[in-house]
Amino acid sequence: MATVTNGKIDSAGPAQSAPASRVRWRIMFLVMAAAGLTYIDRVNLSIAAQPMQREMHFSTIELGWIFGAFQLGYALTQVPGGWAADWFGPRRVLAVAILWWSVFTALTGFVPNLPLVSWIGLVGAFIVVRFLVGVGEAPNAPTCNKIIANWMGSHSGGVGASFIFLGTGLGAAVTPPFISWIMVRWGWRTSFYLSGLMGVGFAVLWYFYVRNNPEEHRSVNEGELRLIAAQRSQARRRQKSPRPTPWGKLLRTRSVWALLVGYFCQAYPIYFYFTWLFIYLVNVRGLSIKQGGTWGMLPYLSIALLAPFGGVFSDYACRRLGKTAGRRSAVWLGLVVSALFLWLGSRASNGISAVLLLSVGSGASMFAATTFWATCVDLTQEFTGSLSGLMNMFGNLGGWLSPIITAYVATRFGWEAALDLAAIVTIVGAVSFSLVTAGRSLDEPSAAG
């Protein structure tokens, strides 16, 4: 394995001319798999909810509180999860996080038999367990973005971030048929047991294969180290040991606040797809339950297709236009197209046309989302985990408000108005990102690019 001394690669020896290894792409594949696993463990409850509700006699309101418990736990612990990735290293933090959320995912099937039920009731016990699943999943996205910063650097941050959203789209798309198949054969409890078991296995794989930095991985050769080093900022190359996160500096920076507001606005409409889309297609657009389940996969497949393309486009635009203009152009393109197709979808003449148009809107939104995560790497490679956690907290607060506000507007003014509001919020996100200066790294004393 190559060595690094004083920030420089020791290239002596016969391995100098060997082709660069490709370990970083295997690491990115595991990042994609981690993102997909979170959505299997996140969406499985919505699929299992019907038999659970029938067996436990939950009211719709009680089920809503159980659904919301995950989102609250997930949002509130984003910042601690990102900070932990910066301080303790993403390899160890994510391995522990995966074990945590996998155990509590499996425990979801045991809830009716837990002693906790006698203390706070069945609904309360489900709320506690799902809240703790959310706490466990919270470090995943900021930790994966820290891995991307370490292994891909700033210049390939868009491509790296696209692996997160490719995993998101694929995980959300395969979950309904996968969980339904398990439930039909072995019951809803088994779907949680098997989901948890998959997570435990993946945590072991992650811990034993992934390393915090490429210099620590025995399979990375000197050629690949050179490629990765070329993508890193000077501050990241100088880093010897973790330093406390400069929260004051982050929170005094205009680009950071524009990033936070922009991601809040990007996440608000995307959670329409994760919460209300199926009900909208069946109850409002008149599709059958089977049609709703089949056509309802399209938004997630669109995400899986367009999110990676968004990462590639974002990095290409940076090379052609500079870091700041390149990142802005990618976000503007994705969010404006997303808003347009939300508006068109709400006015489509039939249910199939509506879901086709709305699917383009979801994919375009995630086309832009990859750039938000890449921008966290641009602004600070040393504290990527902390900034990513802060940004994702704002995004998930938008996701928490989205189903509540959507229900209120749809009830008072109709579903067309609810989707129009989502389109307007999307445009606000694009405007907010106009204030992000991605070319000015907070790790450097002066502006870059």
Image: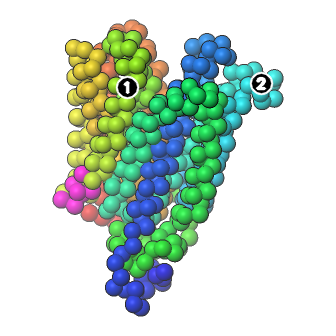
Distance from label 2 to label 1 (Cα)?
36 Å
- Residue 303 located left or right of residue 97: left
Visible in this render: residue 417?
yes
Q: Residues within 10 Å of mark 2 (few under 14, many from 20)?
A: some
Q: Which residue is at 81% across, 23% downward?
A: 118
Q: Earlier in the sequence, mark 2 or mark 1?
A: 2
Instruction: Please report the residue visible at 39 percent of the width from the left and 8 percent of the height from the top.
Output: 412
- Which residue sits at x=35%, y=61%? 154
Quadrant in which residue 342 is drawn: top left
Residue 318: % across, % down: 24, 57
> Quick check: 331 left or right of 83?
left
Q: Is residue 87 visible?
A: no
Q: Residue at x 62, y 26 (%)?
A: 187
> Does 318 lie within the magenta span?
yes
Identify the mark at residue 117; answer none if there is no mark: 2
Residue 346 in the figure: left or right of residue 216? left
Q: Position of residue 101 (x, y in %)?
A: 62, 43
Q: Secondary structure at mark 1?
A: helix
Q: Amino acid at mark 1?
A: Thr
Against 8, residue 24 (above or below) is above
Toward the front, the furthest residue is 185
Seen from the viewer's position, the closer of residues 50 and 402 is 50
Near-viewer residue (245 or 113)? 113
The residue labelled by disc 1 is 294
Residues at discs 2 and 1 in contact (Cβ within 8 Å):
no
Q: Which residues are magenta?
A: 313-320
The dominant secondary structure in magenta is helix
| Number of dots carrying numbers | 2
Q: Is residue 179 left or right of residue 127?
A: left
